[in-house]
């Protein structure tokens, strides 16, 4: 079982190191939720930015401890710095 874990970790390491960061213009993709998805209450649509794992890995220095802000019930929170200053 211990050998299987090491093999799985090696596969994850290989896939993470093979990730290529996106160009700066692709790193800031924002989209808005349609009015039907946002509801019919007359509120503003919700906007959210989506990022690839490779982009987040680059922006957080590979999820380093120095970028770790905190941890909660939904997971860890990291500070990220993108090339466009965001």
Image (cartoon, rainbow, N blue to C red):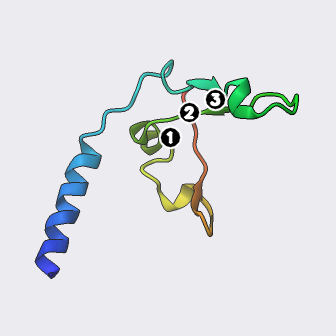
Residue beneath the point at 18% across and 56% down: 11
Location of residue 40 (image quadrant): top right
Q: How far apart are marks 1 and 2 (CA)?
A: 5 Å
Image side of residue 47 versus residue 55, left or right: right
Q: Which residue lies furthest to the right in this view?
A: 42
Q: Measured from the top left, where is residue 62 in percent x and y?
A: 42, 50
Q: Quadrant of the N terminus?
A: bottom left
Where does residue 47 sit, x and y in percent of width and height? Answer: 70, 30
Please, which residue is most extreme toward the top here? Answer: 25
| Residue 76, numbered label | none
Between the C-alphas of marks 1 and 3, the distance is 11 Å
Contact (CB < 8 A) between labels 1 and 2?
yes
The residue tagged 1 is: 59
- What residue is shown with label 2? 82
Q: What residue is shown at x 73% (from left), y 25% (from top)?
A: 35
Query: Circle 3 sits on which residue?
Result: 85
Q: Badge 2, how many Cα within 10 Å: few under 14, some, many 20+?
A: some
Nearest the eye: 29 or 14: 29
Q: Is mark 1 on a helix, strand or loop?
A: helix
Horizontal side of 39 relative to 16 (left or right) equals right
**Circle 2 SS class:** loop
Question: Which quadrant of the rendered structure holds the C terminus?
Answer: top right
Quarter of the image for residue 36 reads: top right
Mark with earlier residue (1, 2): 1
Instruction: Give residue 67's position: percent from left, percent from top.
Output: 56, 55
Mark 1 or mark 3: whose residue is earlier in sequence: 1
Q: How far apart are marks 3 and 2 (CA)?
A: 6 Å
Q: Is residue 9 above or below residue 38?
A: below
Given contact means CB atoms under 8 Å apart, are the residues at marks 3 and 2 in contact?
Answer: yes
Question: Which residue lies at the image location 59% right of the left edge and 63% below the top edge?
Answer: 74
**Foreground residue among 31 and 85:** 31
């Amino acid at each position: 079982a211990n050998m299987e874990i090491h093999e799985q970790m090696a596969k994850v390491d290989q896939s993470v190191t093979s990730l290529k960061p996106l160009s700066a213009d692709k790193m800031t993709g924002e989209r808005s939720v349609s009015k039907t998805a946002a509801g019919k209450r007359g509120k503003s649509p919700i906007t959210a930015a989506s990022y690839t794992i490779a982009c987040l890995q680059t922006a957080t220095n590979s999820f380093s401890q120095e970028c770790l802000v905190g941890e909660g019930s939904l997971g860890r929170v990291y500070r990220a710095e993108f090339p466009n200053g965001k």
